Image (cartoon, coloured by chain):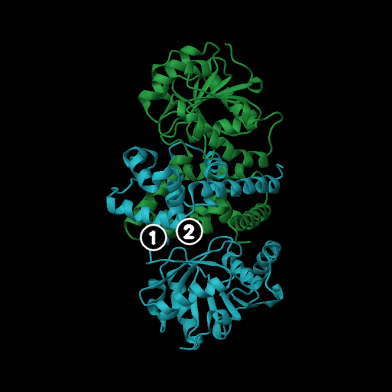
Chain colours: A green, B cyan
């Protein structure tokens, strides 16, 4: 196998130069990589560079790596040339299986070096994308969050024919590049985060359809209600804290799913004791020995900073 | 009618001294009100005051009103005495309809002054709570978000027998008290925000049950993925921006609900052109004439501040 160590990668190829591909390019450039952006449309370069320019002040504020420069982003329409010498490929092409399969076959043929290829796909599975490739073992999911140059999370998982060593490698590479890889246990349509978002979005669409809320009321309830907390803690830890001393176990005993099922069109599954134990064990690991008091203090200190910063940015303070 | 002007309220009664009632008390005290906290349990005062003390540094950081002091929070077990002279009552008692009905009858009898009574209830409807009261017209929903002393949103709506003037009054009062009232068009189980949260939570419980994700993976995907954006924009404006120049109309044309329904167990309703128009009109009002570029800049400036502040609070920077 001819694959560089994750920390030794110098050149990253971003295949697909749209908003997501350009965002990746900006983020990699800020971490000091040489970046090649490939897009079949020659006129994709201008919009790509405008995304990078718009992102750069934020990346400067977050702290650039030594030598980082937008000048080290090169544009090409030549797919084979873009990936041939890359230590890593981030593919953000169109969300169509036929197009992706052709792209992966072409990349695979042009890359004798066994470098890992990660797909930004939201809607497809790596198992399907890799089906026609000569060397599917190096193909993984690397799903980012918008804007990819700022948000740390990348969902990582292999397809049915992926070598687990390629998934390990991708996680180590993303970590070296300043991201937070979330290694999934198995492929699922929508991965993890987009499934959660889609459940909420479908409830939103039902509510607007039924006249229960307007789009403005929906957004107000998010931004000034539960949204800011979700920048600090996820629902598992939040509900574990809401359960007080009894934590998640008390939460499940206290909140009857039969009651709360009236609050959404998506019914809860039966709450078995095995399921409660899965949540309890996970929440205790999330709490990590910190006291409820400490976690509430962390929440409030983070919230105060967010609220003040938000008022400043929106011109209200 | 013998009701003070919203800005002339000096004394607020917080009925129920648990975490939510105590949080309301801290918030009202920070805005310079005299606050009476009532709880039938005499030993509720100690925990109530500890919640207030824990909240106070955050409230100081947000900015106290002149003369604001925790010394102006008085505790009593006497319900009638607590509410008799209050300009406004915020009820945060147990989430049981029989208990709330008794409380509302007792408060109503003790309050000749026609002051508004707002319920913090998550799970009950004002129409049910007010059913047995002598003067139901002054009873409204005033649903806060945890922690109530920091989060600005309050969902406000009347029950079937509420005077719309009482709902107007409550919105004006909350605004004077530094909150952001969200006036709902009609009662709905779970109100607005908790319905959205419950849809996501039920998807989470299904995913953990099915082995698609662990609690840790769920929380990681929220906090480092989509969470921070929701402190800045709700899904309607976010997806309107994701639609590019075509906005929400393009978003609905581009994202086939038949595809994204595979991402959650909650199916989408049929996307009719009337429904699309409701979203488009709402999103255009949310955009409010600002350019996509300006909104993306606002998003990034807010995100950079949040991410840096979060790293500082969690000791990572």
Q: Which residue is mark 1?
A: A213
- Tell me if A210 is positioned left or right of B54 in this view: left
When the figure is inspected, residue B32 is found, relative to residue A168, above or below; the finding is below
- Residue B271 percent coordinates (x, y): 30, 48
Dividing the image into 4 quarters, which one contains the C terminus of chain B?
top right
Marks 1 and 2, Cα distance to the nearest angstrom?
10 Å
Q: Is residue A187 positioned above or below A258 on the image?
A: above
- Look at 48% across and 40% down and name the residue there: A193
* Sooner in the amino-acid sequence: mark 1 or mark 2: 1
- Dot 2 falls on a residue whose secondary structure is helix
The residue under label 2 is A221
Choose between B75 and A82: the one closer to the eye. Answer: A82
- Residue B112 makes an appearance in the image: yes
Q: Chain of mark 1?
A: A
Q: What residue appears at the point 38 percent right and 60 percent down from the top-left corner? A: A213
Assign a secondary structure to mark 1. Answer: loop
């Amino acid at each position: 196998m001819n694959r560089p160590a994750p920390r030794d990668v110098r050149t990253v190829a971003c295949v697909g130069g749209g908003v997501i591909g350009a965002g990746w390019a900006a983020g990699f450039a800020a971490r000091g990589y040489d970046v090649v952006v490939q897009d079949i449309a020659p006129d994709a370069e201008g919009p790509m560079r405008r995304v990078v320019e718009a992102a750069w002040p934020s990346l400067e504020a977050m702290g650039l790596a030594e030598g980082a420069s937008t000048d080290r982003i090169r544009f090409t329409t030549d797919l084979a040339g873009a990936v041939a010498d890359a230590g890593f490929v981030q593919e953000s092409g169109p969300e169509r299986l036929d197009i992706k399969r052709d792209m992966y076959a072409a990349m695979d043929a042009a890359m004798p070096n066994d470098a890992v290829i990660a797909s930004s796909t939201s809607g497809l599975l790596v198992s399907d994308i890799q089906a026609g490739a000569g060397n599917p073992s190096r193909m993984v999911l690397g799903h980012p969050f918008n804007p990819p140059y700022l948000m740390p999370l990348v969902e990582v998982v292999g397809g049915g024919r992926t070598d687990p060593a390629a998934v390990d490698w991708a996680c180590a590479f993303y970590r070296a590049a300043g991201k937070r890889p979330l290694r999934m246990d198995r492929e699922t349509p929508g991965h993890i985060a987009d499934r959660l978002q889609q459940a909420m979005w479908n409830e939103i669409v039902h509510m607007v359809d039924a006249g229960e809320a307007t789009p403005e009321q929906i957004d107000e309830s998010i931004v000034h209600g539960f949204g800011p907390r979700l920048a600090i803690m996820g629902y598992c830890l939040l509900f574990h804290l809401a359960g007080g001393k009894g934590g998640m176990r008390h939460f499940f005993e206290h909140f009857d799913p039969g009651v709360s099922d009236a609050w959404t069109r998506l019914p809860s599954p039966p709450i078995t004791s095995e399921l409660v134990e899965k949540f309890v064990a996970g929440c205790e690991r999330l709490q990590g020995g910190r006291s409820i008091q400490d976690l509430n203090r962390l929440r409030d200190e983070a919230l105060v900073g967010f609220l003040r910063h938000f008022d400043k940015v929106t011109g209200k303070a």
